[in-house]
Every structure is written in structure tokens, then in C-alpha cells.
Amino acid sequence: MKTWTVQCTFAAYYANTVVVQAPTLEAALEKAIEEANGDMGWRSLDDSGPTFVDAVAEGDVWDPWDGLQSSLPVPARFTERGEPPAVTVIVQFGSVQAVRTEHGPVRVEVRDYDVEGADAADLATDEKGARYARSLWSEFPQDADQER
């Protein structure tokens, strides 16, 4: 049986609610982050995230980040970010039938460059000037009005 030294971590959450004025949502969010970071109003939410692995080394070592025991690669499912999303696009008879995802929500843009006979008004143009039919698939509620 092998011995391993594993550094486990969890994120402790703090919040600071600020009120800002800005011309756009993005400007408001940037301003709020800047203001919150410079403010002393942070408070603990008494909540923590799931435990994840920062570093692992084989053997009984003082610090898995130190010396000859350089940290081994941590499999994605044990990291703070977890498994990356996986996307499967199902195409049949020249059109997308479904998009399936695993390990979290994603946004998928499908570009179909086989556009012979398509209505030019329904096509987009890429950075190289090529025309394509575009369909969007998303699992984020705020994207519902832009899908497909």
C-alpha cells in the first residue's frame, strides 16, 4: 500500500453588498467589484464550498508543493473546477437535432457552412468572410431568447 500526502482545501465565502451607479450592467459590475474590494464591509456567509484537492505527492512529506516531491497532476474531478463540461452535438440529415452536455451548463454555437440554397437573410458571416447558418444551444436561462 502506498502513502500519499494530499492538501485538501475549501473556499470560505464572504460577501459585501454595494450600491453603484453606472450606464450599463457591465460597467456596474466592474464598478461594484472595484468598490467592494476597497471597502471594509465584508462579512462571512458562514458557508463553504466543497472540499477539493490542491496538491498531492507520493509519500509522507511535509508539504506536497516542496522539494523533490513535486505535486502530481490532480485528476479534474478532484479539483476546484471539477470535470470540465463535455458537449455532444447530434447531427442528422444535415441539421443539428440535439446538444447534450455533461458536468455543468454550457453555451454551444453550431456553425453549418453547408449553406447552398439557404436564404441569405438567415446566414451569418465569419471573420474570414465565409457564410454559415448559426444555431445557439444554451442551458443558461438568460440565453433563452437567443437560442436556435
Image (tube, rainbow, N blue to C red):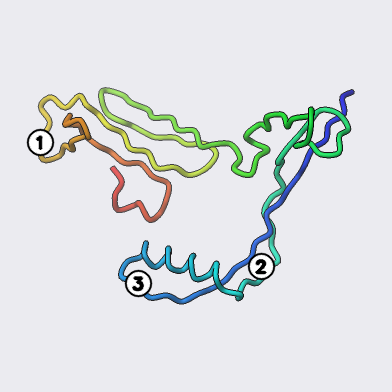
Asked whether the beta carbons under mark 3 and mark 2 sit within 8 Å of each other, the answer is no
Mark 1: few, some, or many residues within 10 Å (few <14, many ≥20)? few
For disc 3, the marked residue is 22
Which quadrant of the view contains residue 141? bottom left
Residue closer to the observer: 138 or 50: 50
Q: Is residue 18 above or below residue 14?
A: below
Residue 44 location in percent, x, y? 68, 69
Indicate which disc, 3 or 2, sits on the residue closer to the N terminus.
Answer: 3
Between disc 3 and disc 1, the foreground one is 3
Mark 2: few, some, or many residues within 10 Å (few <14, many ≥20)? few
Between disc 2 and disc 1, the foreground one is 2
Secondary structure under tag 1 reads helix
Q: Is residue 47 left or right of residue 123?
A: right
Amino acid identity at mark 2: Leu
Q: Is residue 26 above or below residue 106?
A: below
Numbered tag placed on residue 45 in the rendering: 2
Residue appearing at x 64%, y 36% in the figure: 77
Secondary structure under tag 2 reads strand
* Image quadrant in which the C terminus is located: top left
Residue 105 location in percent, x, y? 48, 44
Residue appearing at x 61%, y 40% in the figure: 82
Secondary structure under tag 3 reads loop
Q: Is residue 20 left or right of residue 144?
A: right
Between disc 3 and disc 2, the foreground one is 3
Amino acid identity at mark 1: Ala
Which quadrant of the view contains residue 93? top left
Q: How far is disc 3 from disc 1 in space, using C-alphas?
A: 39 Å
Residue appearing at x 33%, y 31% in the figure: 97
Q: How far is disc 2 from disc 1 in space, using C-alphas?
A: 53 Å
For disc 1, the marked residue is 120
Q: How far is disc 3 from disc 2 in space, using C-alphas?
A: 27 Å
Mark 3: few, some, or many residues within 10 Å (few <14, many ≥20)? few
